[in-house]
Image: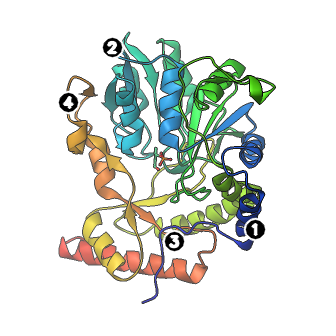
Amino acid sequence: MHKIPLIKPYITDEVKAKVCQVLDGGQLTEGATTREFEALCRQHIGCAHALAACNCTVGMEMALRLFGVGPGDEVIVPDYTYSATAAVARFVGATMVLVDVDPATMLIDYDALEAAVTPKTKAIIPVSMFGNPLDYNRLREIQGRGQFKIIEDSACSIGASWNGKKVGNWADISVFSFHPRKFITTGEGGLVTTNRDDWAAWMDSYKHFGMMRMAEREDIQFGMIGTNFKMSNILAAVGAVQMKHIEELLAKRESLALRYREKLGGVEGITLPAVTPGGRHSWQTCCVFVEDRNPIMKRMRADGIEVQVGNYALHMHPAFQPSAWCRHAGSLADSRRVFDRALALPLYYDLTESDQDIVIERLIREVRAERSKGGAT
Ligand SMILES: Cc1ncc(COP(=O)(O)O)c(C=O)c1O
C-alpha cells in the first residue's frame, strides 16, 4: 500500500555527517554544537537569548519557576492544547485555570482569558497553536490590567511571525518544541527565548544544576538548587543543520498548506481554520474542520494516509477534572467542538503534489460519503 505519513523528519546526509562529526569529536554532552544551534535559533528569531533545553515541557516549567509561580497562584491556559501546557502549573504546585478557545483560530479566547484573571493569576500560558501566532497586542492589553507574566507555549511556532517580528520576541518568555512531530526536530528538544538578560542568566544557571557560570570551569560554584535540562551536542547537531535550512523548509510548508487551503476551502462540509490577522503561520500542522471526523480519519488511515486529530480538549480527560488545583472557566464548549472537528493533514518537506492530491481527493470523497449518510446534500 502506498503510504503518506503525517510528518517526516528532515534527516539528510548533511544532518548525518554533522552528527558523526560530534560523535567522532567525543564531546557528547551540551557544548559547542548546542551553542551553535542556539545561535542559529537566536539569529532566526531575532531575540537576545535562546537557551536549548531537553524539551518544551521542562522549558515551560523552568519559566514558571523563574517567575516564582507556586502554591496559591493561578496559571491560565487554553483548554484546547497538549497536556504539557497545563501540567507544568501542577509541577510547581499552582492551580491551572482552563479557558475556552476561539473556534475559528483554535487560539485562547481573549475575552474568556480576561474574565478569568484574578488577583491570584501569576502567569498565563497562551499557545500559538499549530504555528498560528497570537494577537500579542491583545495579550499585553490584558496583562496591563493584572499582575502576571506571559509565557508563550510556542511549541509549534518556530518560524512563525506576527506583524513582521518572529514568535519568540512577543511574550515575556517563549518556549519551542523540537519533538519529532515538529518540522525542526532534534528527536526530543526545546528552546526558551527571552529578551531579558537577567531572566536568561537565571535560566542558564537553573538548567545547569544551579551553577554560577564562572569564566574558568575549575572554579564552579552552585548559586542555587538547579536541575539538568541540557540538550546534548548530538541532538543539537541534528537541529543545527535543519535551522540552516529553515527558510526553505518554511517556504515549502507554506506553499503546500496554501495549496491544501485553496483546493479544500470551497468544499461543502470542510471549513478552514482562521489565521491571525497580521500573522505568518508556520504551518507546523495544517488542519481542516470536518463534521464526523473520526470515521473519516479511520477510513483515510486504513488507506495509508496518516491523518490525525489536532490537539486535545483537556477538560474531557480524567487528569484535568475540577479539583483543588484545576479550575474550568465556563463550559469549554468551543474547545470540545474544535477537538471533535479538527483533522491534521500530512505535511512534510518532500511531500509531492501528486501525493497531496491523493490526500485531497480522498478527504473530499470521505467527507461527501459522511454527508450523504447524514442526509446532507
Ligand atoms: C502545544 C504543545 N505544547 C507542548 C508540547 C510538549 O512539547 P515537548 O514534547 O517538547 O515537551 C507539545 C507537544 O509536543 C505541544 O503540541
Q: Is there any visible trace of residue 102 in the rendered image?
A: no
First in residue order: circle 2 vs circle 1: 1
Asked if the beta carbon under badge 2 is closer than 8 A to the nearest atom of ligand 1, the reply is no
Asked if the beta carbon under badge 3 is closer than 8 A to the nearest atom of ligand 1, the reply is no
In front of the other: label 4 or label 3? 4
Hey, what amino acid is under mark 2?
A: Gly
Find disc 3 in the rendering and name its residue.
Answer: 263
**Element at label 2:** loop
Find disc 2 in the rendering and name its residue.
Answer: 72
Disc 4 to disc 1: CB gap under 8 Å: no
Q: Is residue 50 above or below residue 122?
A: below
Residue 189: percent from left, percent from top: 57, 48
Find disc 1 in the rendering and name its residue.
Answer: 17
- Cα distance in 3D space between marks 2 and 4: 16 Å
In front of the other: label 1 or label 3? 1
Disc 2 to disc 4: CB gap under 8 Å: no
Q: Is residue 197 above or below residue 248?
A: above
- Cα distance in 3D space between marks 4 and 3: 42 Å
First in residue order: circle 2 vs circle 4: 2
Q: Name the outermost residue toward the top.
A: 119
